[in-house]
Image: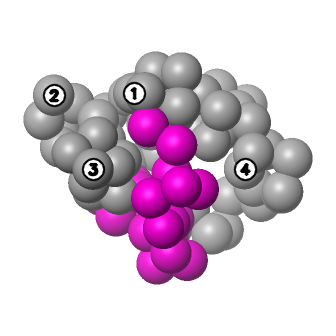
Amino acid sequence: MTLESIQQQLCTEIEILCGLKRGAVNESTDLTKLGIDSLKFVSLLLVIEQKFGVSLMKTGLKPDDTKSAPNFAAAILRGCGA
């Protein structure tokens, strides 16, 4: 599993969750401006746990980790190695 593949899958999951068209979320998208409320965020964390086998809440997820797809993907990759 590479950082790029995780990021690509993460972007797709965020697009589905937010009802956005394919390609709307990329490495330069500010995820904080997508209107992801707490319920959607928890849903995203559950998808991440199922898809990647990592519980980000147990690995010390920080606010900066959720600001962009590259940061989020790096947090997932760190969690996979933990």
Q: Identify the amino acid type marked 4.
A: Phe
- In space, the residues marked 4 and 2 are separated at their CA atoms by 23 Å
Report which residue position mark 4 lands on. Answer: 41
Q: Residues within 10 Å of mark 4 (few under 14, many from 20)?
A: some
- In space, the residues marked 4 and 1 are separated at their CA atoms by 16 Å
Q: Nearer the viewer, residue 17 or 78?
A: 78
- In space, the residues marked 1 and 3 are separated at their CA atoms by 12 Å
Report which residue position mark 1 lands on. Answer: 52
Residue sitting at x 17%, y 39%: 4
**Helix, strand or loop at disc 4?**
helix
The span picked out in magenta is: 54-72
Report which residue position mark 3 lands on. Answer: 82
- In space, the residues marked 2 and 1 are separated at their CA atoms by 9 Å
- Image coords of residue 55 (percent x, y): 52, 43
Which tag is nearer the camera, tag 4 or tag 1? Answer: 1
Q: Residues within 10 Å of mark 1 (few under 14, many from 20)?
A: some
Q: Earlier in the sequence, mark 2 or mark 3?
A: 2
Residue 39 is left or right of residue 63, and the answer is: right
Q: Give the farthest residue toward the left.
A: 2
